[in-house]
Image (cartoon, rainbow, N blue to C red):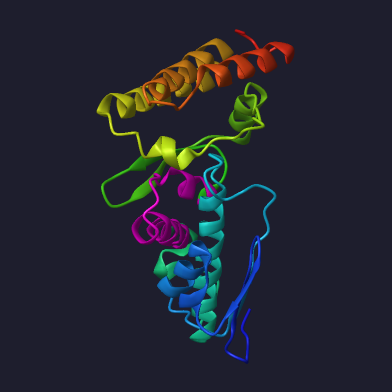
Amino acid sequence: MDRPDKRVVASYRRLDEAPSATEIANGLIRESALVHGFVDGFEVHTLSQVTSLGSGLGVSSSIAVALAATFSRLDVMRKGGNVEPRWQDGGEVAWRAAVAKHAWEVEIDRLLRPIGRQDHMAATYGGLRLYRFEQDGASVERSFSEEDAAWVARHLLLVRLREGHDSYVILSRVKSSNQLQAAYDAVAVGMDAIQARDPRILGQALSIGLSSKMLIPGAVPASVREVIGEISRCQGVYGC
């Protein structure tokens, strides 16, 4: 929201107030504002029950996307334009692509976080989709149905570990082409699983992904694997 007193107020885990966006401690809010030309005179509040730093759940990317969408529309309003995407500008598709790009530019290029662009695409487009990543961009290659997404969700188990982990540390160690190839291979197997509605094939895809992560030092400690295995067995997860 605009502030007539030209102050900047940012609320996240704490309340931050300053005369300029450059003095805001929260990097996502600060850089998102600056990249869209907002230096002063605005107020931003973000709400999350999960930390945005290294949880591995894409929280920071989701916040970055929300901020990019907000500031981009505020910029249009500030210039007296219509906030709804126009057909002649590419419509909703072009607007979403621009929002995702602004979001990953903030996190990757400006804040130098060792992450990929997949979480920004997922937060921007939602649903279950297959993305194609090029050197400077990304696009939606395939969109799956709600039934497909529901089937996958029914065969996944999310485990919250008490001690947590730092995904930034793990991602900074992903440098091997073999690891990236394994992730790529897992996608093809996962698509076969969705088409066949076969949880065993889905398990194979997840195993390929886990095998690639096992190559990263400290990514999946033995103690963590044991805890996840025990929880999974108690939940009656297939294959445990």
Q: Position of residue 238 (x, y in %)?
A: 64, 10
Residue positioned 27% across, 29% down in the render: 176
**Considering depth in this image, is 40 or 133 the residue closer to the camera?**
40
Q: Is residue 90 above or below residue 217?
A: below
The verdict on residue 142 being magenta is no
Judged from this view, the residue extending furthest toward the bottom is 5
Determine whether, in the image, residue 56 is placed left or right of residue 235: left
Residue positioned 46% across, 18% down in the render: 205
Residues in magenta, as a range? 95-124
The verdict on residue 111 being magenta is yes
Quarter containing the C terminus: top right
Determine if residue 155 is in view.
yes
Residue 165 occupies which quadrant of the picture? Answer: top right
Residue positioned 56% across, 68% down in the render: 70
Q: Main secondary structure of the magenta part?
A: helix
**Considering depth in this image, is 237 or 171 the residue closer to the camera?**
171
Quarter containing the N terminus: bottom right
Determine whether, in the image, residue 229 is placed left or right of residue 191: right
Residue positioned 44% across, 56% down in the render: 100
Q: Is residue 173 above or below residue 20?
A: above
**Considering depth in this image, is 219 or 128 the residue closer to the camera?**
219
Q: Position of residue 9 (x, y in %)?
A: 62, 77
**Considering depth in this image, is 159 or 89 the residue closer to the camera?**
159
Residue 97 occupies which quadrant of the picture? Answer: bottom left
Q: Is residue 231 above or below residue 166?
A: above
Q: Position of residue 5 (x, y in %)?
A: 62, 92
Determine if residue 86 is in view.
no
